[in-house]
């Protein structure tokens, strides 16, 4: 709702600027989108008169006009508008002027003829195209004949007004009118406003009833009234009315239609006018549409209706979509003589559904959706009739045809002063609160500190005491509320162990060089089903926006691979990302809500090092990523050993470079290289990933942090190198060493793996360093030799190892 | 030549040699040995002492010691000088260009939205709020109905929803956690003070200002004596912490079905300091969050007596915060995970 500052000031005595007013409205009522002065940015645009015009010698449409702009000499301006005519007062952009979009007008030559400025159409000086009246859409605009030559044009066409654009929330439908806004301002500024309605003194000899009838036996209509007005003269509205409309963002059409729109913005009640002579038969019915019915709307669109739509129909067909838009066939045209006015209240939900379904959002539907005052229809009808009589010379029938007349009672809400202060944290006095309610036009009966508040029907948003508290708060001013923090019993705020572990996990992976990525949880069915860690069914959206985001993810890896691809496509080759988030598993196809399981995953491609001038970084391999995972898992202080078991069970992973990760025998996820085929599909280079079920890690038992005595006795190291079959794994050898190592073996460290020169085919050389220590005494060589020999013997026995 | 003269000559020649030497090795080996060694010049001279008359012996002996000391001192001095020179030469040869880049270890970066969420969580934990997370796949009942948004409520239009079935949807807000915690909370144990960060979804087409996935942080405090002043103080604290306390906070009326009164909080535009610019659409203010006093219907639907208990709730968007705070003009940047974008935040 675009509110005119000037119009407001006709009703209320305000000594604040439009900007200050807007700020006050924002702090007290509804949001303000903008305050715009239409003439802002325009310069040197004045009233001129066309003294003469001749055809341009080199053009079939240009005219050379001599324009009097109140100076000694007329200006010569070449103009291509089809409607240029001698004597007309026109909008002249002088040389050096600025018109819409900050365009500067200079003197120029048009096909060889000098032109000193420009004659303007309304859109050329900033009018939105959709508010320019049809008659002025394709030509220059003619100002009133009494416009003074050389004057700035702005005042003549309402451009010096300031327009406050209110963004009205769904609860404040009452603010979608001048009267509603004024009532709120009256309360805010504590200034009186005189909001009256005009009413005719004498009506025509005939009656509505003799010419017409209506019916509406349907719940979705709360109130429905018509009145017939005969012998109207349809013509353009007077300029003042047109200005009111276009400054409210509404296109002037003709006087009768304009009056209905004017009434709507002034009083908040949408109205409609039908051409009586174009209605088939002499009665109309409000009813549900039939499924094969169609209507051509005022916007000249054909709309197919069905039985969920509410229409106003004549004997033959729908003539309006109730509360949304009228039909073209029965619209008011310059030929219209007899008018049927409609003033009604339709069900908000019904109107909203129609507007949404057909994507026809109109000024009328916007108001009906938010609710209009059902008790005010008679005032509105009288005011509209008065204006049609005044501006279109219509003969108004005195009787009003009422199909439904459902009145509502004022809302009574009880509230105590204590309650208000309790909720707001204020110390308001009774008289302050009563004053606020009275300024809002509410009736108040006080019984001690208990108030009985009588809320008029125009404020349909107020039902309970909280609603009244909001009224007190906003009129009293949020700025005036105290600023405190909650008091009361102390509560403990800390992360739960699970939250702490998740946060630690993020910190740890970041410390290990991985950057936190957040990808989309909604993905394609194909990606959702990759890298699965368990049997699961997918969760589909019923109406996705696009197939790219149609299924809930069941792994974190694909999102990360998309991220890797995005980076590598932009020449960022080195990508090390992790993601922590939920995947969505379903145990059966019938399960509706998926289990939401926290995962943590990583994808690394390229190098983890910075590019260095003194050392070429190397691309990551399986062991680098495994090292990261190891460090991370170690940071979780899990109780039990971490195992990597080679697997080829993930079709998207390299079958020879992938391992399941087990902690204390529990499967927690996998690590490995993305299958080259998968990598190709994602358009990524060699990439390593891991994906872990974080909830399993959370649930697994943790070690208690303990102090381990640092021995003061020296340790002894022994190295062992052996040739073994190349299929023997490090894990197998480690198991034997640890198992047979004896009580003093404290550390085993693999320091060499070799299978090149001097190593027979099918064999490899593995070398370990074993560290022994007795924490309580000095170890003897004898003790170490004995233990070491045992390890050697067992390695030979188990793997046929050749000790070197 | 007397022995004394010989010693004198050894001293003079020795000192000259020492002075002239530029070789550390020469000083520590050759010269030293030649002068002070067992077969050195002084020893050689001293062998003659036994032939001297007894009364001269001590004098020559004393003199010989003096010569030895002098030479010793000269040698040490010279050795130090040469060693210093040698070290200086070595150091100067070792000179490097300290402006060459350091070999930094690469560390990862937190996601800027997560960083903001963590900051908010820490702030509220300090005030005794617990942090809770709820399901992303939510029931219509919690997402809408228990938030005082019955079916056909116009405010539902403000939140286009991804449905899975008629009753199950991707949550459009973190507000359902209000209903879920209200339902469970045991008020005999104390007030409910909770924030709930998380991912939410809207059926929107992705563009610079819309994302079908974004984040919210919900907060709620319910007790017997919670006031709107408490809400105001809390929001002021929050915005000052996040954006800096030189900014003003303004509350203005708004509408949310689950709060009454409802407000939105604006802060002074930090780009123009309130003068008006493109970022604040020339209003001088930037909207940062929505809040209000929890609607009695929400309390009652969750089984909480709204006569006895009440409080406030607020919801804010970390994505929006990050966009405002860092001038990010495309929300999609948060979800594309461009390393060059992510690594700018620490």
Image (cartoon, coloured by chain):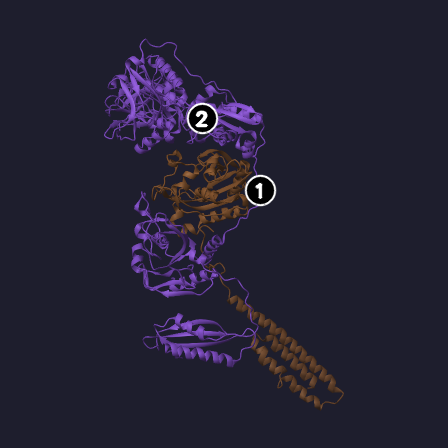
Whether tag 2 and tag 1 are in contact, CB under 8 A, the answer is no
Q: Quadrant of the C terminus of chain A?
A: bottom left
A244 w.r.t. B244: above or below = above
- B157 in relation to A4, above or below: below
Decide which of A742, A103 is in the foreground and name it.
A742
Residue A488 lies in quadrant? top right
Task: Name the chain under label 1.
Answer: A
User: Is the residue B130 above or below the residue A85 in the image?
Assistant: below
Query: In the rendering, at what x and y percent does residue B89 appear?
Result: 54, 68
Report which colour depicts chain B. brown
Q: How many marks?
A: 2
The answer to whether residue B228 of the structure is visible from this angle is yes
Residue A271: percent from left, percent from top: 35, 22
Q: In which quarter of the view is residue B146 placed?
A: top left
Give the labeled residue for mark 1: A488
Determine the colour of chain A.
purple
Residue sitting at 66 percent across and 80 percent down?
B11
Q: What residue is shown with label 2?
A: A459
- Closer to the chain start, of discs 2 and 1, is 2
| Residue A545, x across and y down, in percent | 32, 43
Query: What is the chain identity of the residue bearing mark 2?
Result: A
- Residue A116 visible (yes or no): no
Residue A576 against residue A766 in the figure, above or below: above
Q: Residue furthest bottom?
A: B51
User: How many residues crowd mark 2 within 10 Å: few (<14), some (14–19), many (20+)?
Assistant: many
Q: Quadrant of the N terminus of chain A?
A: top left
> Percent position (x, y) of residue A594?
37, 49
Determine whether, in the image, residue B236 is placed left or right of residue A527.
right
């Amino acid at each position: 709702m675009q509110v005119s500052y000037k119009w407001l000031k006709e009703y209320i005595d305000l000594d604040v600027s439009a900007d200050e007013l807007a700020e006050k409205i924002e702090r007290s009522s509804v949001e303000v989108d903008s305050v715009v002065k239409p003439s802002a940015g325009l310069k040197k645009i004045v009233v001129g008169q066309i003294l003469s015009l001749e055809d341009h010698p080199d053009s079939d449409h240009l005219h050379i006009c001599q324009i009097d702009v109140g100076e000694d000499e007329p200006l010569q301006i070449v103009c291509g508008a089809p409607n240029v005519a001698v004597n007309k007062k026109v909008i002249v952009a002088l040389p050096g002027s600025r018109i819409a979009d900050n365009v500067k007008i200079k003197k120029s030559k048009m096909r060889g003829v000098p032109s000193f400025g420009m004659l303007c159409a309304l859109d050329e000086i900033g009018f939105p195209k959709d508010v320019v009246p049809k008659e002025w859409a394709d030509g220059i605009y003619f100002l009133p004949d009494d416009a003074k030559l050389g004057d700035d044009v702005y005042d003549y066409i309402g451009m010096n007004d300031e327009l406050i654009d209110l963004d009205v929330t769904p609860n404040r439908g009452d603010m979608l009118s001048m009267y509603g806004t004024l009532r709120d301002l009256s309360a805010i500024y504590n200034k009186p406003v005189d909001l009256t309605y005009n009413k005719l003194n004498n009506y025509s000899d005939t009656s509505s009833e003799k010419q017409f009838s209506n019916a509406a036996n349907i719940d979705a209509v709360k109130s429905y009234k018509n009145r017939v007005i005969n012998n109207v003269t349809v013509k353009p509205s007077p300029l003042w009315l047109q200005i009111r409309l276009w400054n409210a963002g509404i296109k002037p059409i003709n006087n009768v239609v304009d009056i209905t729109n004017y009434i709507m913005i002034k009083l908040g009640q949408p109205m409609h006018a039908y051409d009586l002579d174009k209605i088939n038969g002499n009665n109309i019915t409000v009813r549900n549409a039939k499924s094969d019915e169609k209507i051509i709307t005022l916007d000249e669109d054909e709309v197919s209706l069905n039985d969920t739509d509410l229409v106003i129909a004549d004997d033959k067909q729908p003539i309006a979509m109730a509360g949304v838009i009228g039909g073209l066939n029965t619209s008011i045209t310059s030929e219209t003589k007899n008018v049927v006015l409609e003033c009604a209240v339709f069900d908000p939900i019904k109107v909203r559904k129609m507007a949404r379904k057909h994507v026809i959002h109109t000024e009328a539907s916007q108001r009906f959706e938010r609710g209009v005052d059902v008790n005010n229809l008679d005032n509105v009808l009288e005011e509209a009739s008065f204006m049609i009589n005044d501006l279109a010379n219509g003969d108004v029938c005195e009787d009003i045809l009422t199909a439904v007349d459902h009145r509502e009672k004022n809302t009574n809400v009880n509230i105590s002063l204590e309650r208000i202060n309790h909720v707001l944290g204020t110390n308001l006095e009774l008289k302050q609160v009563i004053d606020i309610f009275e300024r809002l036009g509410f009736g108040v009966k006080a019984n001690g500190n208990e108030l009985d508040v009588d809320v008029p029907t125009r404020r349909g948003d107020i039902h309970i005491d909280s609603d009244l508290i909001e009224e007190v708060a906003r009129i009293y001013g949020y700025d005036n509320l105290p600023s405190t923090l909650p008091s009361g019993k102390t509560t403990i705020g800390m992360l739960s162990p699970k939250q702490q572990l998740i946060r630690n996990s993020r910190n740890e992976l970041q410390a290990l060089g991985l950057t936190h990525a957040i990808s989309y949880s909604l993905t394609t069915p194909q990606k959702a089903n990759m890298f699965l860690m368990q049997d699961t069914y997918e969760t589909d959206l019923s109406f996705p926006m696009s197939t790219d985001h149609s299924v809930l993810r069941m792994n974190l890896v694909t999102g990360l691979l998309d991220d890797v691809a995005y980076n590598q496509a932009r020449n960022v080759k080195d990508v090390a990302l992790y993601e922590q988030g939920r995947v969505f598993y379903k145990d059966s196809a019938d399960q509706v809500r998926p289990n939401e399981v926290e995962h943590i995953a990583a994808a690394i491609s390229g190098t983890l090092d910075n590019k260095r001038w003194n050392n070429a970084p190397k691309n990551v391999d399986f062991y680098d990523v495994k090292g990261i995972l190891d460090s991370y898992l170690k940071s979780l202080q899990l109780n039990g050993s971490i195992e990597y078991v080679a697997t080829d069970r993930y079709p998207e992973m390299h079958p020879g470079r992938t391992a399941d990760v087990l902690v204390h025998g529990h499967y927690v996820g996998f690590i490995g290289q993305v299958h080259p085929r998968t990598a190709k599909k994602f358009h990524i280079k060699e990439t390593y990933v891991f994906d872990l079920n974080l909830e399993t890690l959370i649930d697994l038992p943790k070690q208690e942090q303990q102090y381990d005595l640092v021995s003061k006795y020296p340790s002894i190291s022994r190295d062992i190198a052996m040739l073994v079959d190349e299929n023997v794994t490090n894990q197998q050898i480690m198991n034997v060493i640890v198992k047979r190592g004896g009580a003093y073996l404290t550390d085993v460290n693999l320091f060499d793996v070799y299978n090149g020169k001097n190593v027979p085919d099918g064999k490899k050389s593995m070398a370990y360093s074993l560290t022994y220590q007795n924490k309580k005494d000095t170890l003897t060589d004898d003790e170490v030799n004995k233990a070491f020999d045992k390890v050697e013997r067992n390695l030979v026995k188990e793997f046929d190892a050749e000790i070197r | 030549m007397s022995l004394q003269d010989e010693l004198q000559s050894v001293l003079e020649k020795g000192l000259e040699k020492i002075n002239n030497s530029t070789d550390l090795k020469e000083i520590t080996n050759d010269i030293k040995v030649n002068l002070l060694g067992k077969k050195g010049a002084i020893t050689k001279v001293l062998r003659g002492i036994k032939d001297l008359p007894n009364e001269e012996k001590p004098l020559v002996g004393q003199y010989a010691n003096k010569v030895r000391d002098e030479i010793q001192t000269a040698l040490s001095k010279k050795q130090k000088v040469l060693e210093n020179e040698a070290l200086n030469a070595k150091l100067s040869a070792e000179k490097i260009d300290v402006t060459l880049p350091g070999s930094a270890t690469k560390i990862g970066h937190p996601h800027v939205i997560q960083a903001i969420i963590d900051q908010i969580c820490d702030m509220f934990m300090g005030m005794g709020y617990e942090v809770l997370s709820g399901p992303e796949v939510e029931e219509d009942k919690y997402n809408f109905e228990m938030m005082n948004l019955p079916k056909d409520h116009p405010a539902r239009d403000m939140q286009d929803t991804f449905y899975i079935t008629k009753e199950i949807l991707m949550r459009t807000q973190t507000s359902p956690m209000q209903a879920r915690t209200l339902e469970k909370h045991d008020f005999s144990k104390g007030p409910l003070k909770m924030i709930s960060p998380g991912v939410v979804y809207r059926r929107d087409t992705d563009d610079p200002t819309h994302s079908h996935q974004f984040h919210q942080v919900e907060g709620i405090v319910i007790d017997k004596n919670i006031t709107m002043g408490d809400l105001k103080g809390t929001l002021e604290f929050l915005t000052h912490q996040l954006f800096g306390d030189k900014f003003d906070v303004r509350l203005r009326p708004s509408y949310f079905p689950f709060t009454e009164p409802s407000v939105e909080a604006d802060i002074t535009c930090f780009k123009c300091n309130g003068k008006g610019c493109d970022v604040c659409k020339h209003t001088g203010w930037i909207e940062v969050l929505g809040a209000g006093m929890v609607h009695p219907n929400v309390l009652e639907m969750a089984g909480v007596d709204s006569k006895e208990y009440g409080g406030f709730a607020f919801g804010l968007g970390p994505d929006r915060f990050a966009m405002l705070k860092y001038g990010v003009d495309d929300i999609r940047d948060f979800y594309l995970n461009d390393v060059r974008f992510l690594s700018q935040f620490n």
